[in-house]
């Protein structure tokens, strides 16, 4: 039997005694994000493992959440003291947490990161109001027109750039059991996004006047709704119940000639032909072809910890994440969907070297180009009206469309009712 | 009297129609879960799969936390069912047998628990559970599930107890049985169908509960199937194969429960209370 020497025992005992101290010296951070599909969770975990290994004094763990519940869950969890230290956000989510006093401005930190990585201005503007910047931009998502060049060629249709061409193309493509244009009419966020994409291309991007009063009820908005409603005749009959997934399935199965979506690359590659040469993406057609706009969501991370040490550790993590060698791999947790919000991120090898990104490089370049003209209702022209959070939460844009498309209301009346509803919610 | 043939045909057709309405979605989900991705979303849906793959199941079980969600759901639903039965049986018997002031009022009032939509009490309950350290705990879900299943369980079991002929209980009492002995040895076996119905109700309620589980549980490791699965499906991009495989597996425990308890349930009905 091997004898255990006394000094060894003492060393072991000392090590055991010191272990809790070593663990206590670590700063533990909890990250909530809403990227729940398994492959995204896996990618985030890979990055967290790397960060934790390279920063022995910090441990970041993830707790994926659902967009459907997080609006209610996060304020309740923070109030109960069981909330996260970092939480992903879209622009209309941030005002909710700011209103309950959960946020402190990260303006200095964002300016530091901007100096190093050069943020897209619109991404920062969406979180800049009330004399502060309330979240750090992380990635962009913008809506695009997706199509198959072979289908358009076979029908003798060019890629539409105006509303007139768009309607004509949709009509031509609606044949033989296929539908020209897949557009939703559900009272849901996807419809908000597609409706606003049409509004933004019809001169109705501003929902507020400069003084903060509503200007939703205007002739351009009515015209945009009228056009959208006309286009619904070229959509499948179940489109009024669609969310993003159904639209993608319609496109992937070639049942829809064109759809509006942030990205279809992943689904097209794994559930459809996967022929990169036959996947087209273009800017959303505008009323008169003069400038193409789109809805864009600059996703960000809110730093929520009230503890100074944890706040500093959170900043260390965000600094690390935005380094070009890490940032591209973070964006490619869903290739083709999440676009960079920094200048050096847009050039990063870690972004462009992903096999899926390499395969669909022309499409992704177009998406990035389109995102330059991205805007979001309530966050336009450098003016931010946090009251938009309540309007967005109730899907008033989609509700207005439903009044027209489902209930047969006159577009002018529906838009006027929409504005009244917005005023009620704002009050 | 023999039923006219046209009635038999009409009845069979009506039953087939309703059976089709109920079973067709299950058939589409089950067969869809073994189809290739392109066939799942094909423009013309196929009733019988033209392709066969188990990749969706493999991906679901290997690349996601679905097995963890299933285990959590099984624990939460089983414990909730057990506690519901342990509380509902004596409570139902007490409402039937014992005399106490306000018995009838209380018996009717217990169903008022269902008058409040769960969403209304969600945030206050979150605050209470946070104060006693039950957030992100499966115990919180068990408490909620029991609280919601118990009123109906008590109400239902009391009706079953009331359906047993008084002579049986009186005979047991004359033989010297205490209320507890009478309940355990005589009444419980006689209300077995009711207990089975309550067990099925409590289990299915707990198995499908979404609202509280989505808010009370914070970490992935403690999520139940409805909440965890909704996350796996994704928002902007849906893996339809994964969705159908997960949906197919999620009904498995309920089907198994019905297979076992259902037999007991039917046996209880056919045997009857008085032999």
Image: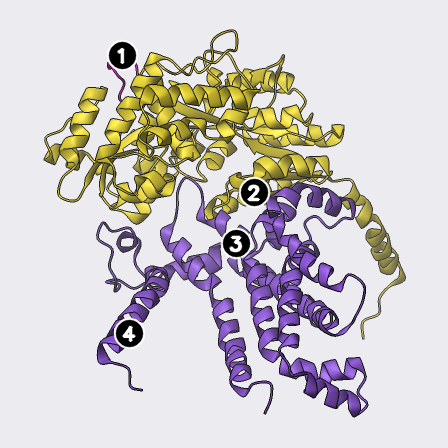
Chain colours: A yellow, B purple
Q: Are marks 2 and 1 on the same chain?
A: yes
Question: Magenta region's main secondary structure?
Answer: loop
Magenta range is A285-292
Q: CA distance from mark 2 to mark 3?
A: 13 Å
Looking at the rendered structure, the secondary structure element under dot 1 is: loop
Residue A214 at x, y = what percent?
A: 47, 14
Residue in the picture at 37% in, 43% down: A245
Say which of marks 3 and 1 sits in front: 3
Residue named by callout 2: A65
Q: Is residue A113 above or below residue A271?
A: above
Q: In front here: A53 or A180?
A: A180
Residue named by callout 1: A290
Looking at the rendered structure, the secondary structure element under dot 2 is: loop
Q: Are marks 1 and 4 on the same chain?
A: no
Residue named by callout 3: B226
Q: Is residue A210 above or below residue A345?
A: above
Residue in the picture at 52% in, 18% down: A124
Relative horizontal placement of residue A89, taking residue A20 as reference (left or right): left
For the N terminus of chain A, give its image quadrant: bottom right
Looking at the rendered structure, the secondary structure element under dot 4 is: helix
Task: List the single residue furthest toward the top.
Answer: A211
Q: Chain of mark 4?
A: B
Residue named by callout 4: B12
Residue B21 at x, y = what percent?
A: 33, 62
């Amino acid at each position: 039997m091997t004898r255990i020497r006394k000094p060894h025992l003492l060393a072991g005992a000392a090590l055991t005694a010191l272990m809790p101290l070593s663990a206590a010296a670590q700063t533990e951070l909890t990250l909530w994000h809403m990227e729940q599909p398994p492959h995204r969770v896996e990618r985030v975990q890979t990055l967290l493992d790397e960060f934790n290994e390279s920063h022995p004094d910090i441990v970041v763990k993830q707790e994926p959440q659902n967009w459907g519940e997080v609006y209610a869950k996060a304020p309740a969890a923070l109030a109960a003291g069981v909330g996260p230290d970092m939480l992903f956000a879209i622009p209309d989510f941030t005002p909710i947490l700011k209103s309950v006093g959960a946020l402190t401005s990260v303006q200095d930190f964002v300016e530091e990161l901007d100096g190093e990585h050069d943020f897209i201005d619109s991404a920062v503007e969406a979180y800049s109001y009330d004399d502060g910047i309330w979240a750090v931009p992380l990635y962009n998502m913008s809506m695009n027109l997706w199509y198959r060049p072979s289908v358009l060629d076979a029908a003798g249709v060019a890629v539409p750039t105006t509303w007139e061409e768009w309607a004509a193309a949709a009509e031509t493509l609606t044949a033989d059991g296929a539908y020209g244009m897949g557009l939703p009419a559900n009272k849901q966020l996807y419809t908000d996004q597609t409706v606003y994409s049409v509004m933004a291309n019809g001169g109705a991007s501003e929902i507020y006047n400069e003084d903060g009063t509503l200007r939703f009820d205007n002739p351009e908005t009515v015209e945009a709704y009228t056009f959208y409603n006309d286009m619904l005749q070229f959509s499948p009959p179940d489109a009024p119940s669609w969310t993003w997934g159904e639209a993608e399935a319609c496109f992937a199965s070639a049942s829809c000639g064109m759809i509006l979506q942030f990205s279809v690359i992943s689904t097209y590659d794994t559930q459809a032909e996967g022929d990169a040469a036959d996947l087209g993406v273009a800017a959303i057609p505008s009323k008169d072809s003069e400038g193409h706009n789109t809805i864009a969501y600059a996703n960000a991370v809110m730093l929520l910890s009230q503890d100074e040490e944890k706040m500093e550790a959170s900043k260390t993590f965000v600094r690390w994440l935005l380094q070009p060698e890490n940032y591209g791999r973070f964006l490619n947790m869903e290739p083709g969907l999440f676009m960079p919000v920094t200048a050096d991120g847009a050039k990063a090898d870690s972004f462009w070297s992903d096999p899926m990104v390499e395969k669909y490089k022309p499409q992704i370049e177009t998406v990035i180009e389109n995102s330059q003209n991205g805007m979001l209702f309530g966050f336009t022209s450098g003016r931010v009206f946090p009251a938009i959070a309540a309007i967005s939460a109730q899907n008033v844009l989609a509700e207005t469309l439903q009044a027209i498309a489902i209930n047969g209301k006159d577009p002018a009346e529906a838009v006027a009712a929409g504005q009244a509803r917005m005023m009620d919610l704002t009050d | 009297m023999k039923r006219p043939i046209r009635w038999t045909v009409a009845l069979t057709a009506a039953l087939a129609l309703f059976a089709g309405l109920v079973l067709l979605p299950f058939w589409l989900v089950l067969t869809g879960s073994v189809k290739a991705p392109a066939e799942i979303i094909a423009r013309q849906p196929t009733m019988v799969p033209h392709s066969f793959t188990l990749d969706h199941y493999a991906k679901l079980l290997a690349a996601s936390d679905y097995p963890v969600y299933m285990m959590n759901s099984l624990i939460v639903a089983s414990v909730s069912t057990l506690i519901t039965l342990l509380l509902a049986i004596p409570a139902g018997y007490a409402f039937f047998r014992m005399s106490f002031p306000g018995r009838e009022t209380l018996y009717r009032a217990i169903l008022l628990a269902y008058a409040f939509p769960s969403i209304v009490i969600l945030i206050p309950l979150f605050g209470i559970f946070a104060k006693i350290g039950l957030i992100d705990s499966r115990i919180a879900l068990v408490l909620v599930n029991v609280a919601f299943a118990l009123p109906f369980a008590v109400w239902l079991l009391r009706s079953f107890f009331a359906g047993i002929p008084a002579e049986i209980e009186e005979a047991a009492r004359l033989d010297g049985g205490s209320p507890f002995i009478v309940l355990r040895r005589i009444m419980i076996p006689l209300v077995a169908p009711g207990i089975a119905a309550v067990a099925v109700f409590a289990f299915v309620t707990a198995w499908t509960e979404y609202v509280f589980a989505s808010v009370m549980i914070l970490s992935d490791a403690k999520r139940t199937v409805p909440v965890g699965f909704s996350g796996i499906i994704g928002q902007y991009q849906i893996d339809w194969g994964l969705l159908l495989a997960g949906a197919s597996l999620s009904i498995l425990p309920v089907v198994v429960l019905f297979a076992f308890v259902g037999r007991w349930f039917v046996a209880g009905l056919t045997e009857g209370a008085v032999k």
